[in-house]
Amino acid sequence: MTELSEALPLSGITVVSVEQAVAAPYATRQLADLGARVIKVERPGGGDFARRYDTTVHGESSYFVWLNRSKESLTLDLKSARGRDVLERLLAGADVFVQNLAPGAATRLGLDSPALRERYPSLIPCTISGYGTSGPWADRKAYDLLVQCQTGLVSLTGNEHGSARTGVSIADIAAGMYAYSGVLTALFTRATTGVARAVEVSLFEALAEWMGQPAYYTRHGGTQPPRLGTQHATIAPYGAYPAADGKDVLFSIQNEREWAALCERFLGRPELVDDPRFATGSDRVSHREELNAIVAARFRALDSQEAMKLLDAAGIANSGVNTVEEFLTHPVLEERHRWQDVRLPGGAGPVPALLPPVDLAGVTPRMDAVPAVGEHTDTILAALGHSAADIAALRADGVV
């Protein structure tokens, strides 16, 4: 454990997590960033299947490296009585239990929230499911892209040629964020009232919340926002335009002052300010194609750097459309020192990892190593009172 963990906000909090993939590991990694001790329970042998999504980070999965630093890995066969006994002993001393098991598995194992609250009244159980633990879809499996489809998000992304998935695991990330904030809220409630409340988050309902604006637009406007690529359904001009050097530049007009500045200082067409086709935001959306033709012609006459300088001078927010490689060397990340090295299993690396985005004054986040499968099994079992012979027997029988 890092030397800094004693000063971190969640120092002294123990989290046991039966987790896999993205949503639950993302929630618990953020708890670990704040100093919580996170014991990650994995299957003996292969462990979390996200370890095998790819091998791009010095032989490790990019997903796993992102989501699992600063954790302790314990392998347990939860279908065996002895494995369950180890888990129960851990839960007896834990503050939080997080799980994103397959539908029905937690109940079969006696790890559902009602059962846990009976056995451990001070434990905060957190369940992350696909579509909720009740209701007509409680038994359905859910993966990120399935949920993107079910919430209608995929129907909004892409362009006139077809839909597209969002480029990151947005449903998993949304659920992980709500699980994280839900656990923090439950810890605060327990500290102030003594009551440990269960937390439940589903991928579907987390992403449904993020679909709020298009939901209102569709319900009350009669049609859903169209797929427009980088264009905006309710604002124009707003989107990316190719400059003369081939790089796309995105900008957005948010108000009438910016519209006037665009016409006068970037387009060189002051007469467009009062053109009835473009007089209001709604007019500009209604005449999007005509407006885009005018804007695109101006961009074709400028290279991207020149275009961005002119937009900056006019006070209009803009950005080049960066590649991931360009993002990695972004001056904001470099000059604000947002990268910190993290060690990998087996001594590989280290690799640079981004600091957590929330800065707490006077607090340095925990950025410890990514664990190997079962790396901490012996240490954890010994702390629970198991002798070396006991541990050897558990391992020989495939329990750990």
Image: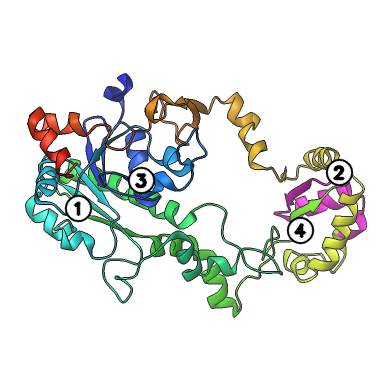
* 341 shown above or below 262: above
Q: CA distance from mark 1 to mark 3?
A: 21 Å
- Residue contact between numbered discs 4 and 3, judged by CB atoms under 8 Å: no
Question: Where is residue 276 shown, x and y percent of the image?
Answer: 85, 68
Query: Looking at numbered disc 1 in the image, what kind of residue is underneath it?
Result: Arg
Q: Is residue 386 visible?
A: no
**Residue pointed to by mark 1:** 197
Tell me, for residue 237, which label it has, or none.
Answer: 4
> Can you say which quadrant of the picture contains the N terminus?
top left
**Residue pointed to by mark 2:** 245
How would you rate the neighbour count of disc 3 (Cα within 10 Å): few for under 14, some for 14-19, many for 20 or more?
many
Q: CA distance from mark 1 to mark 2?
A: 57 Å
Q: CA distance from mark 4 to mark 3?
A: 39 Å
Q: Secondary structure under badge 4?
A: loop
Query: Looking at numbered disc 2 in the image, what kind of residue is underneath it?
Result: Asp
Query: Looking at numbered disc 4 in the image, what kind of residue is underneath it?
Result: Pro
* 313 shown above or below 80: above
Q: Secondary structure under badge 2?
A: loop
Tell me, for residue 25, which label it has, or none.
Answer: 3
> Can you say which quadrant of the picture contains the C terminus?
top left
